[in-house]
Image: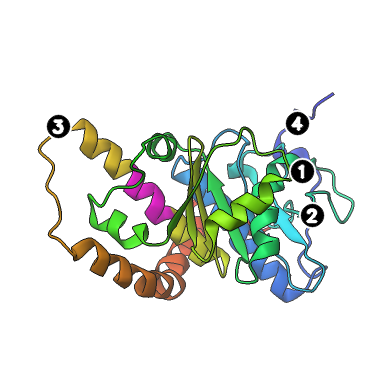
Amino acid sequence: MSDTRPLESVNIPSLEGKVSDEEWAIRVDLAAAYRMVAHYGWDDLIFTHLSARTPGPEHHFLLNPYNLMFEEVTASSLVKVDVNGNPVDPTPFITNPAGFTIHSAIHMARDDAHAVMHLHTPAGQAVSANADGLLPLTQTAMLIRGEIAFHEYEGVAVDLGERERLVSDLGTKNAMILRNHGTLAVGKNVGECFIRLYYIERACQAQIMALTAGDRLNTPPQGSPEITAQQGEVGLPLAANLLAWPALKRKAYRLDPSFAS
């Protein structure tokens, strides 16, 4: 029978001091990212994942417990899994190995992919269903648009054979629109990945709003989308690591510091 007890009554022993300081810091960052996804309303019940690679040569990753809402995820409840999404250590939580197909593909293929985040927001899905993809309608879109790759829909991502095609389509880019599915971001760390995801989601939301507001859309001057894309590729990681992510973590602590337990 499924566990319907309140989360506070479920025994989640703290892992602080039981894992390396480096792993604990990654756990706290990833738990903060889950909480902020919930705060912005980007979660999809318990579905989709945010993942991060743990230190070491074993190719282990942190993933959310499949039966927790994003607003319940804590640093200690994150499950360490192998490349197939199976738990490495004993855990009271269940995982979703099938849902890890997308993440494992990118983590294994890209040494710089320390964090991978994937969402199913209505705005992201709407843009993913648009034949033209993300349009250069706003500064936010233009800043992230040069980093975006596309992957055609193949059904629910449970076929491990799709890994090779996902990786090929992503190439060296750090963001992806999964056609008829949703959005994805890659980062050298959790904070950089989250800010990249934020830009994608904001751009998609603005595009849907603009396209439903009427047909008198202003087209940016020729060349400006390309210039802005170049600025974004340089500026976004700097802004994420030095400014935006530290500010978001402070916000996460103000909202509910339990994520860091």
Quadrant of the snapshot with the N terminus: top right
Residue 140 x %, y % = 29, 56
Task: Give me the C-alpha separation between circle 3 and circle 2.
Answer: 47 Å
Number of other residues with Cα within 10 Å of mark 3, as a class: few under 14, some 14 to 19, many 20 or more: few
Magenta-highlighted residues: 198-204
Provide the secondary structure element on which disc 2 rests.
Answer: strand
Residue 21 lies, with reference to residue 92, above or below; the image says below
- Of residues 43 and 131, the one nearer the viewer is 131
* Residue behind mark 2: 81
Q: Is residue 231 above or below residue 101?
A: below
Task: Identify the secondary structure beneath mark 4.
Answer: loop
Q: Mark 1 to mark 4: distance in Å?
A: 24 Å
Does the segment drawn in magenta span residue 55?
no
Q: Please state if 259 lies on the left or on the right of 214 as rendered.
A: right
Type of the residue with mark 1: Pro
Q: Is residue 202 magenta?
A: yes
Q: Are marks 2 and 1 in contact (CB under 8 Å)?
A: yes
Type of residue at label 3? Gly
Instruction: Tell me the CA gap for discs 2 and 1.
Output: 9 Å
Task: Say which residue label 3 marks.
Answer: 214
Q: CA distance from mark 4 to mark 2?
A: 25 Å
Q: Which mark is residue 180?
A: none
